[in-house]
Amino acid sequence: MAIYDDGRFKIVTEDSLSNIQIFKSLSLPTRRCIAQNAVAVEYLAGVDLYRQSDPPTGLFALQAGRVKLYRQSKKKCQILALPMPGDCFGAESLPTGAPSPYSATTLMPVVIVHLRHDCLQHLLDEHTDFRDVFLQLIIDRLKQFVTLVHDLAFRDVTSRLATVLSLRAEVEGLPHHEGIIYDRLLSQQEFADMVGTAREVVYRTFKKFEADGLVQMTRSSILVYDLDTLRAIALQEAH
Amino acid sequence: MAESSPVKLAELREIPAFRDLPDAQTQSIAAVLVRRHYAPGQIIFIEGEQASSLWFVFQGTVKIIKQSLNGRIQGLCLMNQGKCFGSCPLFNMAKNPATAQALDQVTLFVLPEGDLQQLKAHDPQFIGALLHLYSQRLGHLARVSDVLGTWAVSDRINDCLLTYASSDMQPTVKLTHEKLAALSGTIREVVTRHLNLLAREGIVQNENGHIIILNPDALLPPCAREDEKAFTT
């Protein structure tokens, strides 16, 4: 995959790595090695960074913008995660050499620090602190998927949509005089792909939440009026 | 449970994570491992309990499950010989995120937390082996999420039959309808109804305690066929 074809790239400095959460605990020599080998790339919205079944990719550290990680068969899609600036993704199948277990696509213009596959392998071989950090990265994603499996198996669509809306309010929300507001980011189809249902069902559930005075969705934002009730619905498990 | 007896070097070599380590290192790991035996159905640890060890399957099969507040069960994976589970102490997780239960007669080698932290700090090869195991598991869980989110129940049951079939000339699934239901995210009645339908169509044969697969191709869910095609072309 010629990832640089779609974006501009520039040299990375140690300072420009400071907002990447998992790099903070690394030693100075390791951070220097990353800075020497990584490039910062800008992409527009809708660019595939890698596809499910591609060979193992390098590591992507998101500096700005948002990306979706998802699995797709012909017509159906399941969004697995929406990394935030400061998060890393990709390279999860590097230790086994297996194909990438999911795809990554930009949801808006992004800036990403990219470490190529061979540089990543060098860091894993030569820098023990990086190996620990990479192991932590994989285990964090595992924990996230275990939670997702739990939600898909035991919670109904209403509860799963409430989970997505309340978690995003907690992580991304800004104070608003009527509640908490954040960028909508996803289309109704993408909300449906996150909670594992059809677009029409998500539409109806949103309408119910709006009628109950819990949220209001516009073209660009989501305003949460009643986070506590949304959290309570999120915790309900289907019978 | 469970008496415990020392772990032999040759036994440890059967676990992939330890296969390539130098003898002296493997010997010192064998000295700290504890052998435990579990009967079929016995709980090894429970979701939400304090996590304390890393577990390696030496013999038998362990199922890892999540349970809802209402008692429904979702299988995450089956761990057979050589697999490891229960990694929470490595990652500052105080509690087990899932439950582990012996599916048949199981022998486990247990690495206590203190020794685990020592190994993690001083043995890069061991970390490499763990990376391999967790990377595999991540791919598996991504697929489970996809299957639960987008596949119909009948496709999920079919996929479980193919996943847990023996690799003999006549593939056989040695799981009860209840366990199949847990692994495919549904209830036992739905599994039974679906298996009866498959039996009427000559795709499987229901036997006491196991299911014989007569026509594996007919069980491939449509999206799995697409995945397979994409993977091979």
Image (tube, coloured by chain):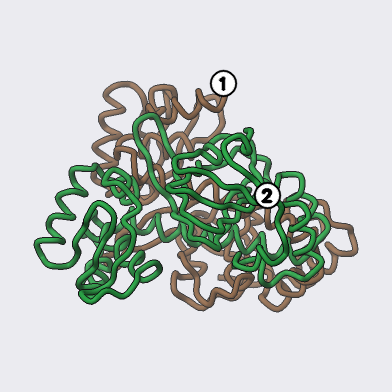
Marks 2 and 1 sit apart, C-alpha to C-alpha, by 35 Å
Q: Secondary structure at mark 1?
A: loop
Q: Which residue is depicted at the point 61% across and 49% down? A: A92
Residue most extreme to the left: A211
Judge by depth and name the residue closer to the eye, B100 or A147: A147
Foreground: disc 2 or disc 1: 2
Q: Colour of chain A?
A: green
Judge by depth and name the residue closer to the eye, A71 or B89: A71
- Local packing at callout 2 (Cα closer than 10 Å; few below 14, some 14-19, many 20+) is few
Q: Colour of chain B?
A: brown
Name the amino acid, label 2. Answer: Lys
Q: Which mark is residue B233?
A: 1
**The C terminus of chain B: image quadrant:** top right
Query: Residue A157 vs residue B160: left or right?
Result: left
Q: Is residue A213 above or below residue A65?
A: below
Q: Position of residue A72 (x, y in %)?
A: 42, 37
Chain letter for the residue marked with disc 2 in the picture: A
Q: Position of residue A21 (x, y in %)?
A: 59, 67
- Local packing at callout 1 (Cα closer than 10 Å; few below 14, some 14-19, many 20+) is few
Residue B37 can be seen in this image: yes
Q: Is residue A89 above or below residue B38?
A: above
Q: Which residue is mark 2?
A: A10
Name the amino acid, label 1. Answer: Thr
Judge by depth and name the residue closer to the eye, A22 or A238: A22
